[in-house]
Image (cartoon, rainbow, N blue to C red):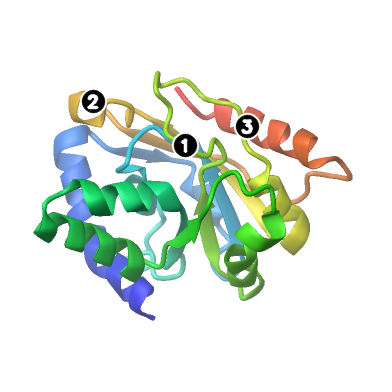
Amino acid sequence: MIPKLVQQLTYWPIYLVLKAFFYYQVEGQENLKGLEDKPVIFVSNHASYLDGPVCAAAMPRNSVVPHKFFPIRFLVVQEYFNYWKNSFPFPVSLFVAAYVRTNGSILVVRGLGDFQKNLAEAVKALKKGAKIWIYPEGKLTLDGKLQQGKKGAAYLHQTTGALIVPVGLSGTFGIFKSKKIKVKIGKPIHSLGNISLEEGIEKIMREISKLVD
């Protein structure tokens, strides 16, 4: 309940700032029609620490805010969370830590090699009908180019049966120098087929690449 309220309250301030300063555009919201009450795995490229708010603002509105799509449970790498928390002055670090927690983010640890353990909370959320957002690259890009994907997104799909929605983010690399931010929402992937996790994530990354300008 708290994550949904937080995302609803912050939706309009974030959306208006993006529109005013970054010529924010969203394409493909029609691809989300009929998914309001279904579990969804959103997958996208990752180029900025601000990708989360950029992504959340892309959800289609019903009435005033996208309450049918909120909360989105973002998967956050534990080491990044620790970095944010420890690298800023006390008031800022406290705000960052509180926002990540109250926003409903799911903390994960990279490199464990144990999907069942590391993604247990994400699996549980999907089985309850949640919408989660995962960045399959596993880390920020250093050059703006799409990186090789990790297998976690394919594992979540194969374990829960939740459909996948690929999303491409353009303009968030070097976001404060960007003149235009665009979010392209692709068509849902209902099944990856009877393939390996490696083949599954390759398919997912190809769909993301088609959406990145």
> How far apart, in angstroms, are the residues tagged by discs 2 and 3?
24 Å
Q: Quadrant of the C terminus?
A: top left
Q: Which residue is mark 1?
A: 139
The kind of residue tagged 1 is Lys
Query: In terms of secondary structure, where does tag 1 sit?
Result: loop
Q: Which residue is mark 2?
A: 178
Q: Going 71% across and 46% down the picture, which residue do you hit?
A: 154
> Looking at the rendering, which quadrant does residue 46 occupy?
top left
Q: Which residue is situated farthest in the right direction here?
A: 194
Q: Nearer the viewer, mark 1 or mark 3?
A: 1
From the viewer's side, name the closer residue of 69 and 52. 52
Q: Is residue 18 visible?
A: yes
Q: Which residue is mark 3?
A: 205
The kind of residue tagged 3 is Met
Asked whether disc 2 touches disc 3, contact meaning CB atoms under 8 Å apart, the reply is no
Q: Nearer the viewer, mark 2 or mark 1?
A: 1
Q: Residues within 10 Å of mark 3 (few under 14, many from 20)?
A: many
Residue 183's spot in the image, x, y percent?
Answer: 41, 38
From the viewer's side, name the closer residue of 180 and 89. 89
Q: Going 60% across and 44% down the picture, which residue do you hit?
A: 111
The image shows residue 164, relative to residue 140, as above or below, that is below
Residue 33's spot in the image, x, y percent?
Answer: 55, 57
Q: Is residue 63 visible?
A: no
The kind of residue tagged 2 is Ser
Residue 79's spot in the image, x, y percent?
Answer: 41, 48
Q: Going 12% across and 58% down the picture, which residue do you hit?
A: 90
> Looking at the rendering, which quadrant does residue 54 occupy?
top left
Marks 2 and 3, the one that precedes in the sequence: 2
